[in-house]
Image (spheres, rainbow, N blue to C red):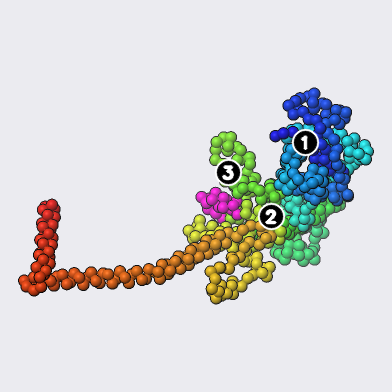
Amino acid sequence: MSAPTHVLFECATGCAIFQVTQVEEIAGKTTAVQEAALDIGNFGRMVKLLSFSPFRSAVDALQSCLDISEGVLNDHLKALITQVLLPSGKKNKGLNLGVSERGLAGAIVGELGIGCDTGSTTLELIRGLRLHAEKLISNMQQGDLSKAQLGLGHSYSRSKVKFNVNRSDNMIIQAIALLDTLDKDVNTFAMRVREWYGWHFPELVKLVNDNMLYAKLASFIQAKERLTEDHIEEITDILEGDETVARNIFDAARASMGTEIGEMDMLNIQTFADRVVHLADYRKRMHKYLIEKMHLVAPNLSALLGEIIGARLISHAGSLTNLAKYPASTVQILGAEKALFRALKTKGNTPKYGLIYHASAIARAAPKNKGRMSRFLANKISIASRIDCFSDQPSSKFGEVMNGQVEERLAFYESGKPPSKNADAMSKALRSIEEAAGDLMDVDGKDDDSDSDDSDDDDEPATMPEAVGASDPASKKDKKKEKASKKDKSSSKKDKKSKSKGGDKDVKDEVARAAEKAARKEAKKAAKKSDGGVPGDESIAKDAESGKKDKKEKKKEKKSKSS
């Protein structure tokens, strides 16, 4: 392509169009030519400023920056190019505009019909313009461009990281990571309480197995010597109404073999036990928070797989968007990367499942069906994550329907009962969404109206809501049925027309056949009366006899051949 005659330059303060007066195409990539662009004296002779259109405000600059990055030709830029390059409205054949963005170049060619160049020569010219922009553009002082670039850069970054606060999957990633850490810490601290307080009251370990109940009892009992029968009721409340165990604890405290502990040591044990109890309570609250957040961000994934496993998948993928981009085969082994690469290295069997192994559907499947079940479940997880990621209005209907499909597939593996079709399941989910929104259409009323009309047009089937962003799978079958019914109707009409047209011909053929039969009967009668009568009867009789003789001879020839 030829060298650019003009260059479009976009900066943080506005847009400018330069005319290219000198350009080196052949030796453009040599070091000498590239270093010459660093000198304002040499580069100033290569380009000439035709027009500069500054932005009116910071908002206008941000909007123009967003449009250019997305390849959109906005009104501000369109007016500048039209005013400078197309003043009379006529296209100049020798015009070639250098543009840095390929998407913007395509938009300029499509809307204005101006040829654009995005090659290396254009990029070298724009590099020089960025370097000397403050000196080439009038009324701009040194430092103005850098300040404008800093402000526009912050605004552009803030606009790109905007998100819905209520549907942030980053909170889920942090919550599940904290939940895993709390599980480990609470178990470690609970074991420390058992070991520490066990020196004073060792019999309590065998009587109470739950870690949190043990910590609560250690904080309440403290020194075992102070226990009386009046404390049995309070111990029963801590044990959630188990009076027998409370009585056993009281008896064990009276005959305990533990060592005595000082006041300061017991105070530290009590403080630590209280901290463990509070940490366990906080863990429960964090679990509730995670469940609520999963129902808000990924309701279908939660209904299909459960909140904890769904949150682990999102955390492992990095975000819900990344999980939605993964194919089902990747989701199936997500979390088993080490086993996968080890199997590929040793040429062994690859893993069948990763994090989804903890799902209840795979746990309930027979050992021989676990691989098939994990493959089917990964397929449904991939669908559910995409619906959650790209839908505007969160709903758990699709997840509930797909969970039913998983149960049907489990029953199919066990008993052979055929599961329902995927199109039927998706249409069921769509109907439930419409019912929940109060937008369910009266299908029976539509059918009655269509039957009463004389036209052949059928009612349109229910389609997927815009919030889901997908097409209804069941609608494809309905469209095929409609086409087939229309073909049948048209063929029946053609048959009726052909019958009406061909009715006269059939009547004429029947009359001709009846006349032939009557002529044959008269010939036979004339053959029988060949002895006398009207002249000409003898010839007819002779013809009839010669015909009989020919038939007899043919029969004899067939018999001789067969023998």
User: Which of 54/526 is in front?
Assistant: 526
Q: Where is residue 304 shown, x and y percent of the image? A: 63, 57
For label 1, the SS is loop
Q: Which mark is residue 5?
A: 1
What residue does disc 2 label? 390
Q: Is residue 535 left or right of residue 248?
A: left
Mark 3 closeness class: few <14, some 14–19, many ≥20 residues within 10 Å? some
Q: Are marks 3 and 1 in contact (CB under 8 Å)?
A: no
Work out whether residue 280 or residue 124 is closer to the camera in this orientation and state it: 124
Secondary structure found at label 2: helix
Tell me if residue 450 comes above or below residue 57 in the rendering.
below
> Which of these two is toward me, 483 or 529?
529
Nearest the camera: 85 or 58? Answer: 85
Residue interval drawn in magenta:
364-380
Residue at point 61%, 73% (across, down) = 442
Q: Amino acid at mark 1?
A: Thr
- The verdict on residue 539 being magenta is no
Among all residues in the image, which is located at the extreme front? 535
Per the picture, the main secondary structure of the magenta-coloured stretch is helix
